[in-house]
Image: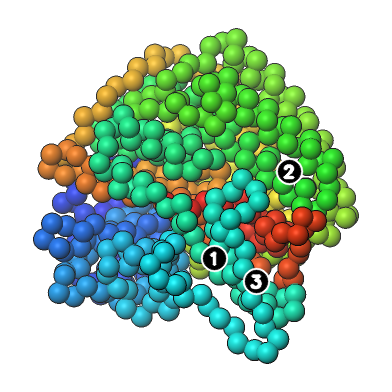
């Protein structure tokens, strides 16, 4: 297999012509064989060329070895189709739907071929369950909370959910296309706007790609500050999710306490860079703000206090039988299902999948300060809640270690000069899971293709499977919005549009 693929590391940059171009059948078999021998499909996307040919790029990851395998195939305009991988490899289903949507190339034999994102030109072909006692419940796309628009269509028998189908992309902004057209300075701002709760995660991936294309090596101190910001982002969201879960089961004292702690982590981000969500910190070549000794000492004191408070409130939360009865064996996603769907991040690790970009494809400061991978095997809401607590503890320990031994070096921002006809790729472990950015340049060193993959792209389908067989839960406000927290992959797990 190695002769038919290009094997690279996270953050690699290489000439596009180095990528092997395989015939269709070999391309398919390379993906299927790789995924049956320990690899998984990290990305699958297309590039439409001037001669109306398309090149489909496949990126596989072998987590245990930390290796990324890249290869491609050509699809010609006279044959605007290819044989679908999905019947043999379910984790390919969303990628192939996106290729069909973006390039007009049909994956023949795809069992569920429909738009990934919302379209207003035609009626969406929702799945239907027939039967005299079957009814349909529609939720969204407008929601009461501060969440992205998404439409949920439930097919139910009584209170039992037979099927949930999710329609996404009501705020599709075309960021990938915009990244190809704007200046690099403007692109930095766009990268921070891909996902409002994952500013550092996506901005870091963008910076890694441009630094690779520009042969820029950032200072150890800048790497440390980026890692600090990324872990603060993870802490704020994990703690916020546990607080939201507490609200939905009516355990309000814990909800209020965790809400305060989330604010503490956001405030630390604000003191670092002037933004509670980490904007204007990461730029190609380094960071725009430093962390002096007095700030580092203050951060350590506040993190130690937050660590104590978090452990006390979580011990209360997970020690109550009334809480456990609502969480255990609810919304189960098995290990096999998680692997088949290609779930990532906490959604995968709570189903027993040992995977984390910070360890498997370590980058930046994570090469020197290891974060142990937290794994829970039961795959239910309890596992996903517990995993957030475990990961929060690991993040605080990591932050205390880095803050205590901050590297001493200059923070110099260097303007990247991109290599022509090259490709760069970067993986970052965001708080929801694996983020991937891929950048291709043309002969004039301009961005030819910018591909963004948010972890939600993998995880949404897991939510549909998690709720099957469970009853609808109406909250006190007469809305179905929050029932997902109890009976699925938690609402905040995958709340964003796909691009």
Q: Along the polypeptide, which appears first: circle 3 or circle 1?
A: 3
Please tell me the numbered disc located at residue 243. Answer: 2
Residue 377 can be seen, yes or no: no
Q: Position of residue 404 (x, y in %)?
A: 59, 19
SS of the residue under disc 3? strand
Residue 102 can be seen, yes or no: yes
Left of 11 or right of it: where is 358? right
> Disc 1 marks which residue?
166
Q: Which is in the foreground here, disc 1 or disc 2? A: 1
Residue visible at 30% across and 73% down? 106
Q: Position of residue 34 (x, y in %)?
A: 37, 65
Q: Position of residue 493 (x, y in %)?
A: 60, 52
> Disc 3 marks which residue?
137
Residue visible at 44% across and 39% down? 193
Compared with 219, 441 (above or below) is below
SS of the residue under disc 2? helix
Q: CA distance from mark 1 to mark 2?
A: 25 Å
């Amino acid at each position: 297999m190695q002769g038919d693929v290009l094997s690279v590391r996270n953050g690699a940059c290489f000439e596009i012509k180095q990528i092997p171009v395989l015939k269709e059948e070999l391309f398919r078999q390379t993906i299927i064989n790789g995924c049956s021998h320990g690899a998984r499909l990290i990305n699958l996307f297309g590039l439409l060329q001037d001669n109306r040919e398309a090149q489909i790029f496949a990126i596989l990851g072998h987590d245990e070895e930390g290796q990324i395998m890249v290869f491609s195939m050509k699809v010609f305009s006279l044959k605007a189709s290819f044989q679908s991988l999905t019947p043999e490899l379910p984790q390919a289903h969303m990628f192939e739907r996106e290729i069909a949507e973006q390039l007009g190339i049909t994956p023949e034999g795809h069992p569920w071929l429909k738009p990934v994102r919302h379209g207003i030109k035609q009626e969406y072909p929702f799945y239907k369950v027939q039967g005299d006692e079957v009814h349909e419940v529609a939720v969204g796309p407008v929601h009461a909370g501060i969440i992205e628009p998404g439409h949920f269509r439930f097919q139910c028998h009584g209170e039992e959910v037979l099927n949930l189908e999710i329609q996404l992309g009501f705020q599709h902004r075309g960021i990938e296309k915009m990244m190809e057209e704007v200046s690099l300075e403007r692109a930095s701002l766009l990268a921070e706007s891909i996902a409002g709760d994952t500013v550092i995660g996506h901005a870091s991936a963008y910076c890694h790609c441009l630094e690779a294309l520009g042969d820029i090596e950032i200072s150890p101190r800048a790497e440390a500050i980026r890692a600090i910001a990324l872990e603060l982002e993870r802490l704020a969201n994990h703690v916020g999710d546990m607080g939201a879960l507490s609200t939905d089961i009516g355990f309000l004292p814990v909800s209020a306490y965790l809400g305060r702690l989330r604010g503490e982590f956001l405030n630390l981000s604000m003191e670092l860079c002037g933004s509670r969500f980490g904007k204007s910190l990461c730029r190609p070549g380094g960071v725009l703000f430093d962390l002096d000794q007095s700030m580092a000492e203050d951060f350590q004191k506040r993190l130690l206090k937050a660590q104590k408070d978090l452990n006390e409130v979580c011990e209360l939360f997970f020690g109550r039988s009334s809480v456990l009865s609502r969480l255990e064996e609810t919304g189960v996603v098995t290990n096999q299902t998680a692997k088949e769907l290609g779930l990532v991040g906490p959604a995968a690790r709570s189903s027993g999948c040992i995977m984390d970009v910070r360890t498997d494809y370590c980058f930046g400061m994570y090469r020197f300060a290891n974060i142990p991978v937290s794994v829970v095997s039961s795959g239910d809401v309890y596992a996903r809640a517990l995993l957030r607590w475990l990961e929060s503890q690991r993040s605080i320990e990591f932050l205390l270690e880095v803050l205590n031994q901050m590297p001493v070096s200059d923070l110099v921002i260097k303007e990247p000069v991109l290599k022509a006809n090259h490709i760069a790729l970067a993986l970052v472990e965001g708080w929801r899971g694996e983020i991937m950015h891929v950048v291709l340049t043309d002969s004039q060193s301009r961005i030819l293709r910018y591909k963004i993959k948010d972890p939600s792209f993998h995880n949404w389908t897991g939510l549909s499977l998690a709720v099957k067989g469970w009853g609808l839960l109406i909250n006190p406000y007469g809305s179905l919005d929050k029932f997902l927290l109890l009976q699925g992959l938690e609402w905040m797990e995958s709340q964003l549009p796909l691009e």
